[in-house]
Image (cartoon, grey):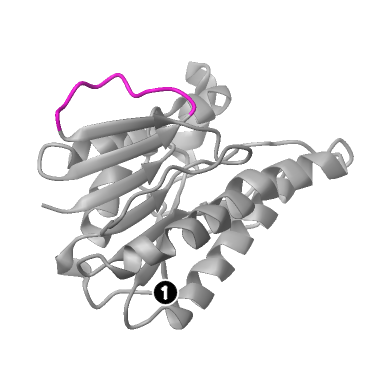
């Protein structure tokens, strides 16, 4: 039974990850609100990753950092503060967590770190300048730490396409938008949170013991983007 620390597990993909792990692992969740889940294997700490001190834990086998943002605006409407806020939640929060829990991870069993990017870091997608810039930094962090922390700690990232979460609700707010999103993907679908959680569960498992420094795109087949 692994001990897994999830940051941002109260909603969306993070919550799906907790649900996929909690029956067979000890899970610690850190987020501003508690997940709607009661399980003896789950411990929750109320915490804002950007401003609060992180709780201590002696040993963990995996750290999963889920917080993110979808701030879609044309470049003319994006303020410098938008870029700073997206960088803070996506990159600085992850760095803070990694630095804090690195000693605990080094004591873990085949320890790993899992971060989250987006397909927009690779594809040229309009109105994604701020989030794509932040998530590109996450991908650089993943590759750099994958090399630096080897062979002790594995580091990987998942880059999903549009996923049916509260964060993406504006993109999926009506049938017209939903059909448009589906048509942009060769598989004619977008992601459900449990699909991302399944990949996350694999990447922190011992079955992925030889995988590190990689960005895994869950893209429903999308290879280009046209306006």
- Classify 10 Å Cα crowding around label 1: few (below 14), some (14-19), many (20 and above): many
Residue at (39% x, 66% y) in the render: 103
Secondary structure of the residue carrying tag 1 is loop
| Residue 123 found in image quarter | bottom right
From the viewer's perspective, is 217 left or right of 172? Answer: left
Residue at 37% across / 81% down in the picture?
A: 150
Q: Is residue 58 visible?
A: yes
Placement of the C terminus among the 4 image quadrants? top right
In the rendered picture of this protein, how many numbered marks are placed on residues? 1
- In the image, taking residue 100 as reference, residue 104 lies left or right, namely left
Give the extent of the magenta segment. 32-40
Q: Quadrant of residue 110?
A: bottom left
Residue 72 horizontal/vertical position (percent):
69, 36
Is 102 in the magenta? no
Q: Is residue 218 above or below residue 190?
A: below
Image location of residue 55, percent across then percent down: 43, 42
Q: Compare residues 110 and 52 and report the one nearer the observer.
A: 52
- Residue labelled with disc 1: 213
In the image, residue 130 sits, relative to residue 95, either above or below, namely: above
Side of 16 where 157 appears, left or right: right
Q: Nearer the viewer, residue 62 or 189?
A: 62
Q: Residue at x 66, y 54 (%)?
A: 134
- Picture residue at 39% right of the left edge, 32% below the top: 45
User: Is residue 216 shown above or below 8?
Assistant: below
Q: Is residue 136 left or right of residue 7?
A: right
């Amino acid at each position: 039974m692994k001990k897994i620390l999830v940051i941002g597990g109260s909603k969306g993909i993070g919550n799906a990850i907790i649900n996929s792990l909690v029956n067979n692992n000890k899970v610690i969740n850190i987020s501003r609100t508690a997940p709607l889940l009661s399980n003896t294997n789950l411990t929750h700490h109320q915490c804002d990753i950007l401003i609060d001190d992180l709780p201590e834990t002696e040993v963990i086998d995996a750290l999963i950092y889920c917080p993110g943002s979808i701030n879609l605006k044309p470049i003319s409407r994006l303020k410098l503060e938008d870029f700073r806020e997206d960088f803070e939640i996506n990159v600085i929060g992850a760095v803070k967590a990694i630095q804090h829990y690195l000693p605990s991870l080094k004591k873990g069993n085949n320890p790993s770190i899992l971060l989250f990017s987006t397909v927009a870091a690779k594809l040229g997608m309009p109105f994604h300048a701020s989030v794509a810039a932040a998530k590109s930094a996450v991908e650089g962090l993943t590759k750099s730490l994958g090399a630096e922390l080897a062979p002790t700690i594995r580091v990987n990232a998942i880059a999903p396409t549009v996923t049916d979460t509260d964060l993406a609700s504006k993109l999926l707010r009506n049938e017209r938008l939903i059909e448009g999103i589906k048509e942009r993907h060769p598989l004619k679908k977008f992601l459900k949170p449990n699909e991302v959680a399944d990949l996350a569960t694999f990447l922190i498992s011992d079955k992925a013991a030889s995988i590190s420094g990689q960005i895994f795109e869950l893209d429903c087949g999308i290879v280009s983007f046209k306006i």
